[in-house]
Image (spheres, grey):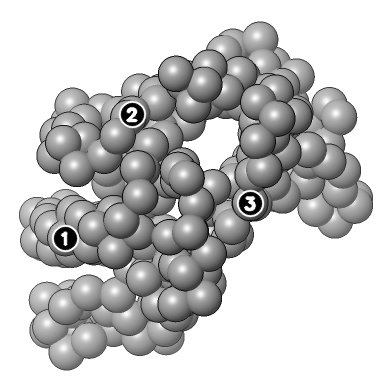
Amino acid sequence: MLGGTMTYGKFVEHAYPALVARATGHTVVNLGIPNAGVDAYLGDPEVLAIAAGAEAVVLQIPGAQNLSNRYYRVHPRRNDRFLTARPLLRMLFREVDFTEFNFTRHMLTELRRVSPLRFERVADELRAAWLERMHALIEVLAVPVTLLWAGENPPPDGGLDMAADPLLVTRAMVDALRPATAAYAEVIISAEARAQGTEGMLFSALDLPAARLLPGPAAHAEVAAHLAALLAR
């Protein structure tokens, strides 16, 4: 199982990979990386070697903001960390002080506020880079890959919500990847699961704000049930 913070299972005792293992009887290796984008996997040959030895891989769809591109660089493993703006981005947004940003979402949200029109040039670059690298990751794995969309809403046909996850990924982008994969799982977390909030989660008082933003045990159970049935087929 490859993916970001949800796959990793932050603040939950049993993330959905462990629940799938329990339901199917198969050995499931959780290779989730907190805040991972596709770069975290393409840059980790040891993880790729483990995944390539599997019977099947589930790849939770990451956002498109957390990858290095012609406009900016991100941390090679903690892909949500913004490192530096490239000259092309500095020229496009001359009025922005990029030293103020530590995270990609914060930076992109500010760029969109400054100029929605210029921001779209950056968004187009990110979407194109994401598609290219997702295809590369699926190809290098060379085993049956199931794409997983897990969220409160289905992939959008258009528009942009800067608070959404996965950020900047559209239905058309997902559809462009599906022919290269073995299966596609789209799990929309139910209102009942979301209403449970942080119930059953494990975190310190300082982590409460972060925990409120992440799926709880009920959401993981819904994803696991869907994946277990799909993988059994």
Q: From this viewpoint, which residue is outermost toward the bottom?
A: 87
- Which sits earlier in the primary sequence, circle 2 or circle 3? 3
Q: Point out residue 28 in the picture as x, y percentages from the top left corner.
A: 64, 44
Residue placed most toward the observer, 60 or 111:
60
Question: What label sits on residue 132 in the rendered view?
Answer: 1
Residue placed most toward the observer, 54 or 44:
54
Neighbours of disc 2 within 10 Å: few (<14), some (14-19), many (20+): many
* Residue at the spot 78% in from the left edge and 46% down from the top edge: 11
Q: Are marks 1 and 3 in contact (CB under 8 Å)?
A: no
Q: In whole angstroms, how far apart are the C-alphas of marks 2 and 3?
A: 19 Å
Q: In whole angstroms, how far apart are the C-alphas of marks 2 and 1?
A: 18 Å
Tell me the element at label 1: helix
On screen, residue 125 versus residue 209, left or right, reads left
Can residue 132 be seen at all in this image of the molecule?
Answer: yes
Task: Return the residue at label 3.
Answer: 29
* Residue at the spot 85% in from the left edge and 56% down from the top edge: 206
Q: Point out residue 179 in the picture as x, y percentages from the top left corner.
A: 16, 36
Neighbours of disc 3 within 10 Å: few (<14), some (14-19), many (20+): some
Residue type indicated by callout 3: Val
Q: Point out residue 135 in the picture as x, y percentages from the top left corner.
A: 21, 55
- Which sits earlier in the primary sequence, circle 1 or circle 3? 3
- Residue 15, image quadrant: top right
Please tell me whether mark 2 or mark 1 is closer to you in this view: 2
- Which sits earlier in the primary sequence, circle 2 or circle 1? 1
Q: In whole angstroms, how far apart are the C-alphas of marks 1 and 3?
A: 26 Å
Residue 112 position (above or below residue 85): above
On screen, residue 210 versus residue 83, left or right, reads right
